Image: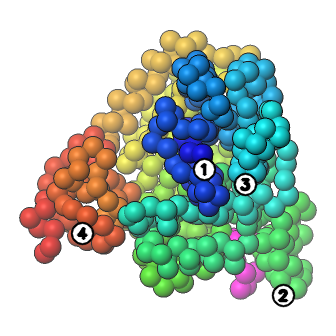
Amino acid sequence: MPSVYIKTYGCQMNERDSEAVAAQLLAKGYSLAASEHVADVVLLNTCSVRDNAEQKAINKMENIAGDIRKNRPGVVLGFLGCMAQSRGKELIDRLPDVDLVIGTQKFHRTAEYLDEILKGKRDKIVDTAEEQGSEGTIREHLLNGNATKSVTAFVSIMQGCNQYCTFCIVPYTRGEERSRSIEDIVAECRQLVGQGVKEITLLGQIVTSYGRRGDVWTAAASEARRRFSTDNAADTKAPSPLRSAGALQKTPFVQLIEAVHEIEGLERIRFTSPHPKGYGDDLVEAYGRLPKLVEHGHLPVQSGSDRVLKLMHRGYTRARFLEIIGKLRAVRPGIGITSDIIVGFPGETEEDFKQTLSLVDEVEFDNAYLFKYSPRKDTPAAAMLDQLPEELIEERHARLLDRVNEIGRRKYEAFIGRQVQILVEGPSKKNEARVMGHTRCNKIVLFDGSERHRGQIMDVRVTRTGSFTLYGDPAIVNL
Ligand code: 5AD
């Protein structure tokens, strides 16, 4: 059977999709190749969120086509995922060596399409169609294929996005929001926990919108209507259980977390990525009530200026964002808060940018990922007239990065001498003598350890810090 090499660009959702494709191919008898140089099939799972992510994947494929195809003409080359979805056949027109282009709703067809190409039944395949039910197809894991067992796992709970932020390509590459059922997700989580998984990260483009469309929300809403039939007048668009008084005051997302929380043997629940507007009081309250829900929130703020937030179509103000952070810190004082920020959105003035700097000072994020604005195909912001010059974006990015790093350094140094609880995930990638785990507040901790620590929840005393990394003292590990 052929061997396959899958390279992934972009977010954790893409990582998870690649894992599901790899598991699917292993089940069909493929083996996983260590590099593109020895593989019979090379698949690049792509990202479209910024232009440089697309360029990286295109350059990589050009190199592979140039190098590898020359010596081994039978190698099958394919693009998967977001860029495959948004560019489709255009990718083959541009890179004629590419045989296969599979969009974001068709990952589960990879084995079938490869089979057709390898058997010579079809020459080129492009499939970027929508598929009903595709949100339920990312479910296979690699846990059993690995010699060593994973103690953390990612579970896809939904696909797509309906937020339409003006800068963002995701609604066009991932499609409309579609959610899996709570029962389906819980069954997958249960199975993972049965295989030794201790921490689960619930994944989706906007997890806080889980179940707001389709069956999950509708079921909750009709139950709410049945009980409190007079209360829905305010919302004409979607029936909202939240607006109904009484028992059903929880969003489907919080209901899902509660259901996963009940799984015995599961120690930690994370989720990514949420939308700040999804942090209603029910979710804040869940942090205070559900001990397996870790003290970490990734809240992408994008900008500190109300004017820019509005142009971005974010659906919250600076004041509302700060209010949410305040509430989260009130229920979980040590909570780690991270964020995403875009620098240089069209029309961003020095005054707007200063608002972002001051928000960063005010919140003191544990870390924030900074992105230079990149115009994306078909998005409203790409057509805005006042695009900023690259040098200005560079300059603002550098100023903001200094601020974020300085605050991060202070926050990490404050951990020195403290005891933190970590879940040991396995050896550090850079140094085999060290093991790596995350604190509940999502900070990486390294200490001198071995395979026997894997999967253990342990208390480690922090002795020193590196860049967004904590180091623990192995001497105190077993106290
Ligand atoms: N340009 C720059 N950054 C972007 N992001 C999304 N779209 C763009 C864009 N067009 C960033 C946002 C988002 C993160 C995943 O990527 O900050 O939260």
**Which mark identifies residue 452?**
4
Labels 2 and 4: the sequence-earlier one: 2
- Span of residues in magenta: 243-252
What residue type is disc 4 on?
Answer: Arg
Judging from the image, what secondary structure is the residue with disc 2 in? Answer: helix
Judging from the image, what secondary structure is the residue with disc 1 in? Answer: loop
**Which mark identifies residue 108?**
3
Badge 3 crowding class, 10 Å Cα cut-off, few under 14, some 14 to 19, many 20 or more, is many
Residue 130 counted in the magenta span:
no
Badge 2 crowding class, 10 Å Cα cut-off, few under 14, some 14 to 19, many 20 or more, is some
Labels 3 and 1: the sequence-earlier one: 1
Instruction: Identify which residue is drawn at 21% across, 62% down.
Output: 450
Residue identifier under label 1 = 1
152 vs 433, nearest the viewer: 433
Judging from the image, what secondary structure is the residue with disc 4 in? Answer: helix
Give the alpha-carbon distance from disc 1 to disc 4, as whole Å.
35 Å
What residue type is disc 2 on?
Answer: Arg
Residue identifier under label 2 = 227
Judging from the image, what secondary structure is the residue with disc 3 in? Answer: helix
**Corner quadrant of residue 409:** top left
**Which one is closest to the eye, mark 1 or mark 4?**
1
Q: Is residue 360 positioned above or below 188 on the image?
A: above
